[in-house]
Image (tube, grey):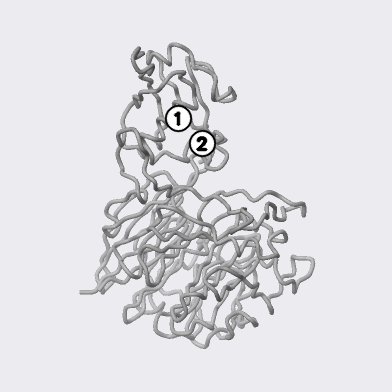
Amino acid sequence: MSDAQTNSATVRVGLPFHLRNLAHVEGDVQLDVSEPVTIRNVLDVLETRYPMLRGTIREYGTGQRRAFLRFFACEEDWSLESPDKPLPDAVASGKEPLLILGAIAGG
Amino acid sequence: MSGVRVLVGTHKGAFVLNSDGKRKDWTVSGPFFAGWEIYHMKGSPVDPNRIYASQTSGWFGQLIQRSDDGGKTWHQPGLPNEAIPAPGPPTALPNKFVYDSSPGTGKPLTTHQWYDGTQHPWEFKRVWHIEPSLTDAETVYAGVEDAALFRSTDGGENWQELSGLRGHGTGPKWQPGAGGMGLHTILLDPTDPKRIYIAISAAGAFRTNDGGETWKPINKGLRSQYIPDPNAEIGHCVHHVAMHRSRPDVLFMQKHWDVMRTDDAGENWREVSGNLPTDFGFAIDVHAHEPETLYVVPIKSDSEHYPLDGKLRVYRSRTGGNEWEPLAKGLPEKDCYVNVLRDAMAVDTLDDCGIYFGTTGGQVYASADAGDNWAPIVRDLPAVLSVEVQTLQ
């Protein structure tokens, strides 16, 4: 939900199994994200609150999404969208999560 | 009461094996970091409770983990294990390995040789080897892929490249071995804190005498038939190098093919493969109390990464090489087709010296009598990537 006074929103983020373990969380992570709610802003807040995740989703140095991870919002693949594009209202309002998924590959 | 702690990195997690000085009965802890590749773990000689681990993943990149209680609990150096309130992230960046290309401290070197001979950008992939300082628990070195040497002086919270190695001049000629271009061996001279040896696949061995500022290739005498100039200054696929702490001028090397020895700190190497049934292999180590006693695990060939005839055998030389004897008692005598990787052999410092190695089949074997008799500590771990031993007093 949006907070009119601070212009922030509570966003839900779904992490893959190994990153949930790394962050010692169960279920979705809830974050207060300043508007506009973009992938970059969400990840900035996520990495601030859970610093053990820094570098696991975005590469150090380049800041690029790791090749075997993808972002989904409202059943749409946002992996190749600009990280500064506002996410759908349903994600910004916390109704739907931003999903971070690991590729099903390897062994 | 003395004891032994064996640190095992595997393809799917880390394990800690503990025993008393008899090394007969073992407890197994783990998996830690289940599902992640643990390339290497090593304890600090200064503080045995301080252990560093390289945790890596093709999906999520490189993480450094640290234990301050002998492997019972772990955390990323400088970071809590739970969420922290905003704002203000910690200053620690324990997983940040960024090559130094600044004109002031680094070198503007951006490419190395690719498999096809073209130049290729340097790309950080993972930490292959961690080497804690012999004198300071907060100082630790990391050998990484693509090959470079990093150092932390704050317990792994932040890392800086020792860029004099990557930029010393031959870097553009370095090329990956079959497993990547990793810096896999770091040997610290116990008598001279400024002297360090490192080895890279497939570039060769290098030495610094000034704490990492400047480096020199030390590959004279190596001969590799698979490169255009078999006697080239660099380009040799060194698999591992071992040193006895009492004789830091003497090094033993398992090269792609050939077991080699130097008595002058790498200035000249000579082959000591002698009567080995095959001189291809990965692991090599030296007895803790006998500087002329060394161990290798011969592997059939670079195309067939398993023991000859399905018989897993360690070979021991008590003469500093050339004369080797097979050690087979307690090891599989048939149908064994595992590999023993370069960092998967270690020795303890008890008397008798204990020898340990892990296999890609998930077995960790131990000998409490310098190799005469062997028994598995565990048989069914994931593929073993590394084995290190801490002798606890």
Residue at 38% across, 20% down: A11
Kindly indicate whether the residue at mark 1 contacts the one at mark 2 (C-beta within 8 angstroms): yes
How far across and how far down the image is residue B321, in percent?
56, 84
User: What residue sits right under mark 2 in the picture?
Assistant: A58
Which disc number belongs to residue A43? 1
Query: Residue B14 location, x and y as percent?
Result: 38, 53
Q: Which chain carries label 2?
A: A
Question: Which chain is indicated by disc 1?
Answer: A
Residue B86 seen: yes
Structural crowding at the residue carrying mark 1, measured as other residues with C-alpha within 10 Å and reported as few (<14), some (14–19) or many (≥20): many
> Mark 2 packing: few (<14 Cα in 10 Å), some, or many (20+)?
many
| Amino acid marked by disc 2 | Arg
Q: Where is residue B95 in the image (x, y as percent from the top left)?
A: 45, 48
Question: Residue placed at 37% from the left, 46% from the top?
Answer: B33
Tell me the amino acid under the disc marked 1: Leu
From this viewpoint, is residue B308 visible?
no
Q: Earlier in the sequence, mark 2 or mark 1?
A: 1
